[in-house]
Amino acid sequence: MSFEATKREWSELYTFFRLLSDGEVYAGTPQAKKNEDECLPIALIQREEHDGTRKYLIESEDIHIVGEKIDKVVSRNTFGDVANAVLAAMKGSSEDLVQSPDGVEEFLDEVAIFDLEARTDDRTDFYIAFYHVDAPLIGFNVRSRMSAMNPLLDGGRTANLKFEQTGIKFANPMINNVNALESPEVVADRMLLIERLGGILKYSDVADKVFRCNLSMIDLHFPRMIAEMLRIMQIEGIIKVPELIERIKEINPLKIKEDLIVKHGFYEYKMKQFLLSLALGMRPAKIYTGEDSAVSGILFVTGGGEVLCYQKSDRKVFEDFLYLNSRLEKGSTEKDKYGFMEKENGLVYFKLNLKIGLTKR
């Protein structure tokens, strides 16, 4: 028998089994490469299953599975064989849905795993104790270049930023004409049409007051910086964060002194703070106080199936990795309600949506 699952589901299971088999994981570099000088031994992995919390203790040759309804010993080599089979299946399929390889379903039944993705409320995929079983558990989530990745920020309508249309007053027929424009790059083309008609889009505010406050926790002027990055992304087609920051440094939307830009790296620093906050728990619609969530790191699966570990205890490497490997993405205009002119209290606004993900390569 066999079943189908998405590559994202398979990626989490693959990562879990790979770590159990290897009993170790290498720290990653900012460039998403393996740090040969930092290999972390794993003593235990804790994962939420259908029947509650389970601990997977890594012994010299076996995995000792302990839970409320299970106490079982399974060879580490078996976990390795299944991980290899799942990896080969993902690599061999051009579709997102991948059929389970021979023997995998039977093995999942044997170890009583029925959820390929852990069902948790704290956004972790599993917890790891390094070095010894009594070490503090560290919460991780999995991000894989072999699948569609969950964004670092996918806030929907709560992540919209508002631009006021100024310059000349647009009559209703003109607004309707702008909103009726359809094209492959519809948001950018509507923005350019507004400019051709004599309008100016000037940053006004964050649409959601909670998200406004969350962004202001990074810096009181950070929303304006993000708004300019969104404008550049739409108009100039630049999506990678480091390239966007280079343009921001040229434009200098916050009108700060050159020493602050060049010597102190102000714009890079603020963006790294923001990305790290997103990775560790900031969400648009939830009040952010600067406290981290249960997620303390990322297990990053490369396109070749190598698992790399990033955690907040190595803050500089983690934030540099996020900075070098992040991009702005375009969400659905219909679902997220942005990219069109709308009246509000007698003024006309145009919204852009903030969505951030990790790069695929």
Image (tube, helix red, strand yellow):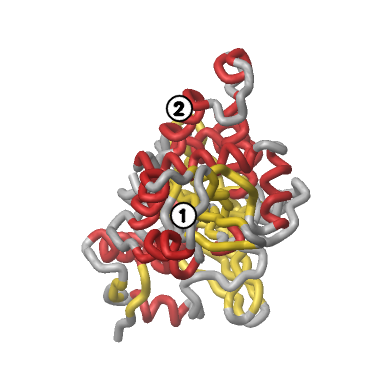
Which of the image's four quarters has the C terminus? top left
Question: Residue 222 at what x, y percent from top left?
Answer: 64, 38
What kind of element bears circle 1? strand
- The residue singled out by tag 1 in the image is 143
- Residue shown at 43%/39% (left/top)? 232
Residue that badge 2 annotates: 246
Q: Between 271 and 211, which is closer to the camera in this rendering?
A: 211
Whole-percent x, y for residue 72 in the image:
56, 74
From where the camera sits, is residue 319 visible? Answer: yes
Query: In the image shown, does 90 or 158 lie closer to the viewer?
Result: 158
Q: In this view, does 79 lie above or below 261?
A: below
SS class of the residue under badge 2?
helix
Q: Which amino acid does label 2 sit on?
A: Glu
Residue 236, placed above or below residue 100? above
- The quarter of the picture where the N terminus appears is bottom left
**Circle 2 crowding by C-alpha within 10 Å: few under 14, some 14–19, many from 20:** few
Q: Position of residue 213 (x, y in %)?
A: 73, 49
For the point 33% across and 78% down, the residue is: 4
- Residue 175, x across and y down, in percent: 45, 61
Q: What residue type is labelled 1?
A: Arg
Q: Is residue 14 visible?
A: no
Which numbered disc covers residue 315? none
Q: Residue at coordinates 37% horizontally, 62% vertically from top-left?
A: 177
